[in-house]
Image (tube, rainbow, N blue to C red):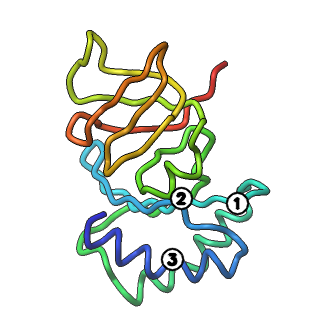
């Protein structure tokens, strides 16, 4: 998490909790030449559009006052979603036994994308059952997301 994301996390967390929600993630990224500041929400009951709007409206004046982002950006608030990214140790702990998709920077055993049951998380390394136990190091992993089979 970079400095901007950490600052926004600290600003957003009390607002999100006040709305009865959980802050899942904050990301500050550049896509297509445009900067985006995204806040992802979670709740055991799900996150609807009204909840996202309430958090967005509550965060607007706080972000204007704190001014944590030096450049212009688009601010988005959304649900973490069913295929959410797993980043922190607690994320992996919460979804142990779930189906995940691991994307690698370069192919391992002929594939850059692996889908399997999350068996373990060890200091950034991820272990899945993909027709046999596979361990990927933190340096190999581009992303890990929950995976829904259709």
Which element type, helix, strand or loop, lies under badge 1?
Answer: loop
Count every numbered label the image shows and give the total. Answer: 3
Residue 115, placed above or below residue 122: above
**Quarter occupied by the N terminus:** bottom left
Q: Position of residue 85 (x, y in %)?
A: 47, 45
Dividing the picture into quadrants, the one containing residue 139 is: top left
Q: Residue, x 40% and y 30% (percent of image)?
A: 102
Residue 43's disc is: 1
Residue 40's disc is: 2
Q: Position of residue 4 (x, y in %)?
A: 30, 72
Disc 2 to disc 1, C-alpha distance: 11 Å
Instruction: Give the crowd class for mark 3: few <14, some 14-19, many >=20 residues within 10 Å.
Output: many
| Residue ID for mark 3 | 12
Closer to the observer: label 1 or label 3? 1
Instruction: Give the crowd class for mark 2: few <14, some 14-19, many >=20 residues within 10 Å.
Output: many
Disc 3 to disc 2, C-alpha distance: 10 Å
**Quarter occupied by the C terminus:** top right
Q: Residue, x 70% and y 60% (percent of image)?
A: 43
Of 34 and 126, nearer the camera is 126
Q: Position of residue 100 (x, y in %)?
A: 51, 32
- The first of marks 1 and 3 along the sequence is 3
Of 11 and 121, nearer the camera is 121
């Amino acid at each position: 998490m970079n400095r901007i994301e950490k600052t926004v996390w600290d600003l957003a967390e009390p607002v999100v909790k006040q709305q009865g929600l959980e802050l899942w993630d904050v990301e500050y990224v550049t896509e297509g030449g445009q900067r985006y500041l995204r806040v992802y929400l979670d709740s055991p009951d799900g996150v609807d559009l009204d909840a996202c709007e309430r958090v967005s409206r509550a965060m607007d004046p706080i972000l204007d006052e704190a001014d944590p982002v030096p450049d212009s950006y688009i601010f988005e608030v959304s649900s973490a979603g069913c295929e959410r990214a797993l980043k922190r140790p607690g994320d992996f702990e919460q979804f142990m036994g779930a189906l995940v998709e691991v994307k690698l920077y370069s192919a391992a055993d002929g594939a850059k994308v692996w889908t399997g049951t999350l068996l373990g998380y060890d200091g950034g390394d991820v272990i899945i059952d993909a027709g046999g136990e596979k361990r990927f190091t933190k340096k190999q992993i581009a992303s890990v997301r929950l995976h829904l089979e259709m």
